């Protein structure tokens, strides 16, 4: 089965950097896009809110001005009518007073009331729309109603208007409390069932007859003329693109921009999107608030294209009308379109800048990732080459070539591993040399003692890795020592020698004497020794080691080395005992048995 190639450790940071950069770019791009979109939506909402507030003020203000105009015209018309009927009532009151003054003593009150009623009955004005009426206050009964005698002789309470309220009942309360006042009622005449005529009147109390005398004017024609004037004004309104329309509370259109729709139901009006905008307007105006705003799509008188429009409708209860105003929101749409185009340009520039900066950042990050990936790879190659060569050589890692702290720590451990291996190899080599030394010493029975001494010194220097060494024998009374062997600049097969059998007293014996006096190994890796105490060396260097070898508690030999490449340790001391103690001591006893100890003393005295 083919193994899937594994990802390289050196290339992993590079690939991870690419992945992180792409993910970060996607996240930043998404976040930035969302932020820009939210800012755009907030700007559009702000524009739409400001324009809609302005449009609402415009259409509401237009309706308010139109209602104010209607109220003003009605007030003017009612003021003129009131002045006229006041004069008429005052004239009738003067006639009744005159009749009472001249005939009050001769005729009864009932006769006088009948005479005055007949005098007032034929008097009409305003093309027959104005008339007189009168009645008894105590009986609440009409005695004169010139416009329609049907109501004469009937009680006031039985006659109601279209809202079900007795329209004559308020007359009695008015004249009793105030003596005179204006009244307004809707009258249904028997000749016109279901039709109510709006009447404006003025009444005044005449005490001699216990009578109220009033003058009424059918203002239906006046209101019709006033409505026509208002409708004409509505058709002429073209203030700032605002279109005004009106329809009755039953939905019948009485004024519309499209004349074809006049007389039809507002429920038949639909906007360009197919929504029943007319029915919605009627529902808003007949609701609890009796007014409302409505948005729809349509075309105005100044535009042939369909667009968003805003309408405001309000009920005018006095006439049973619903007045509305509509305005096109093209300016808002243009502002939104302009803002959208601006945001697109800004977004395009921002996107371009973001892409350029992102590419630069990606390039820098990828370059830095690539550089560090190469450095990681170089470090890994360095370690790989090291481990390949470490088995057969003492190569070490150059810590200066390592960039990363982790690699440097690994380099320290790797170098320590090499040092440990070298130390163990050196120890193994020493053990091999020791074993070889013991074996060769065992085979040197026929060799001279001097050859044995030289061999021991040579091997001591070789085992300890030193440059110089000596072997000194101590006599039995521990007073004199003799130099038996000496090697300088030892290198396996060659050595330099001092004259043998140099004998000195222990007090003047230099380094061997110090070892004898102390009775224990002398190791000095950083000590200053006077020149006269360095015997048998001409120089010691920084390091020297002197080991006394004991036999029966007495020092018989001293083995010393100096000039090692590294400081001497306890392990170096232990190397000398097996090499000298087991073989040199018996030889020393043999020499001492042959009188070499006395010869050494004589030799010292001769010197």
Image (spheres, rainbow, N blue to C red):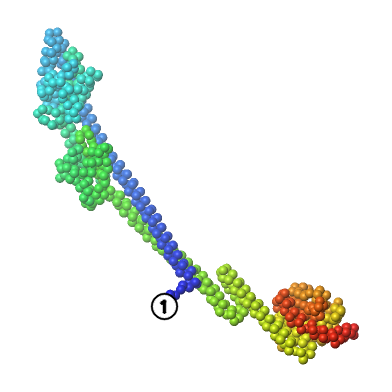
* Nearer to me, 109 or 330: 109
Report the residue at 75% width, 73% height from top. Answer: 526
Residue furthest out toward the top: 105
* SS of the residue under disc 1: loop
User: Residue 310's x, y, as percent?
Assistant: 26, 45
* Nearer to me, 424 or 370: 424
261 lies above or below 149: below
110 lies above or below 191: above
Q: Which residue is mark 1?
A: 1
* Quarter occupied by the N terminus: bottom left
* Quarter occupied by the C terminus: bottom right
Give the left or right position of residue 496, taking residue 116 as reference: right
Residue 62 appears in view: no
* Nearer to me, 483 or 319: 483
Give the left or right position of residue 499, taking residue 465 as reference: right
Query: Neighbour class for label 1 at 10 Å: few (<14), some, many (≥20)?
Result: few
User: Residue 81's x, y, as percent?
Assistant: 19, 27
Q: In the picture, residue 537 is in which quadrant? A: bottom right
User: Residue 359's x, y, as percent?
Assistant: 43, 66
155 lies above or below 543: above
Q: In the picture, residue 151 is in which quadrant? A: top left
Q: In the picture, residue 226 is in which quadrant? A: top left
Report the residue at 39% width, 61% height from top. Answer: 351
Residue furthest out toward the bottom: 446
Count every numbered label the image shows and give the total: 1
Report the residue at 20% width, 37% height from top. Answer: 321
């Amino acid at each position: 089965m083919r193994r899937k190639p594994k990802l390289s450790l050196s290339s992993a940071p590079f690939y991870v950097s690419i992945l992180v950069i792409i993910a970060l770019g996607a996240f930043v791009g998404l976040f930035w896009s969302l932020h820009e979109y939210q800012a755009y939506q907030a700007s559009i909402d702000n524009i739409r809110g400001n324009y809609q507030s302005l449009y609402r003020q415009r259409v509401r203000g237009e309706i308010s001005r139109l209602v104010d105009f209607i109220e003003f015209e009605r007030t003017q018309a009612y003021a003129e009518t009131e002045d006229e009927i006041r004069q008429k009532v005052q004239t009738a009151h003067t006639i009744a007073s005159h009749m009472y003054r001249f005939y009050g003593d001769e005729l009864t009150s009932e006769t006088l009331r009948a005479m005055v009623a007949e005098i007032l009955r034929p008097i009409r004005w305003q093309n027959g729309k104005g008339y007189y009426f009168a009645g008894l206050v105590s009986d609440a009964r009409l005695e004169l109603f010139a416009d329609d005698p049907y109501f004469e002789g009937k009680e006031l309470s039985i006659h109601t208007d279209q809202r079900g309220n007795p329209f004559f009942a308020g007359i009695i309360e008015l004249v009793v409390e105030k003596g005179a006042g204006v009244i307004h009622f809707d009258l249904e005449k028997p000749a016109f069932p279901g039709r109510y005529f709006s009447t404006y009147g003025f009444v005044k109390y005449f005490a001699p007859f216990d009578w109220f005398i009033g003058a009424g004017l059918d203002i239906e024609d006046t209101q019709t003329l006033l409505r026509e004037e208002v409708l004409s004004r509505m058709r002429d309104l073209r203030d700032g693109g605002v279109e005004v329309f009106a329809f009755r509370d039953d939905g019948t259109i009485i004024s519309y921009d499209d004349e074809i729709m006049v007389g039809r139901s507002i429920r038949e009006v639909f906007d360009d999107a197919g929504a029943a905008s007319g029915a919605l307007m009627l529902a808003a105006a007949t609701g609890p608030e009796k007014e409302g705003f409505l948005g729809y799509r349509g075309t105005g008188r100044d535009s042939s294209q369909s667009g968003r429009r805003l309408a405001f409708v309000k009920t005018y209860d006095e006439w049973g009308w619903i007045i509305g105003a509509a305005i096109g929101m093209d300016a808002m749409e243009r502002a939104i379109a302009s803002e959208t185009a601006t945001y697109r340009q800004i977004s395009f520039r921002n996107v371009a800048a973001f892409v350029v900066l992102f590419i630069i950042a990606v390039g820098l990050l990828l370059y830095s990732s690539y550089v560090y990936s190469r450095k990681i790879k170089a470090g890994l190659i360095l370690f790989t080459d090291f481990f390949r060569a470490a088995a057969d050589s003492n190569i070490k890692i150059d810590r200066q070539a390592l960039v990363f702290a982790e690699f440097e720590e690994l380099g320290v451990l790797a170098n320590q591993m090499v040092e440990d291996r070298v130390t163990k190899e050196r120890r193994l080599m020493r053990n091999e040399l020791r074993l070889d030394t013991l074996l060769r010493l065992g085979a040197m029975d026929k060799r001279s003692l001097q050859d044995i001494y030289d061999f021991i010194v040579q091997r001591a220097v070789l085992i300890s890795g030193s440059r110089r060494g000596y072997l000194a024998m101590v006599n039995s009374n521990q007073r004199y020592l003799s130099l038996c062997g000496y090697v300088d600049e030892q290198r396996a097969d060659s050595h330099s020698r001092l004259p043998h059998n140099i004998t000195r007293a222990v007090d003047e014996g230099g380094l061997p004497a110090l070892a004898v006096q102390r009775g224990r190994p002398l190791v000095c890796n950083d000590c200053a020794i006077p020149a006269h105490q360095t015997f048998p060396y001409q120089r010691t260097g920084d390091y020297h080691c002197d080991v006394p070898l004991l036999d029966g508690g007495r020092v018989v030999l001293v083995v010393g080395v100096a000039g090692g490449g590294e400081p001497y340790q306890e392990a170096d001391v232990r190397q000398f005992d097996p090499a000298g103690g087991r073989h040199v001591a018996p030889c020393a006893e043999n020499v001492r048995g042959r009188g070499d100890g006395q010869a050494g003393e004589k030799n010292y005295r001769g010197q």
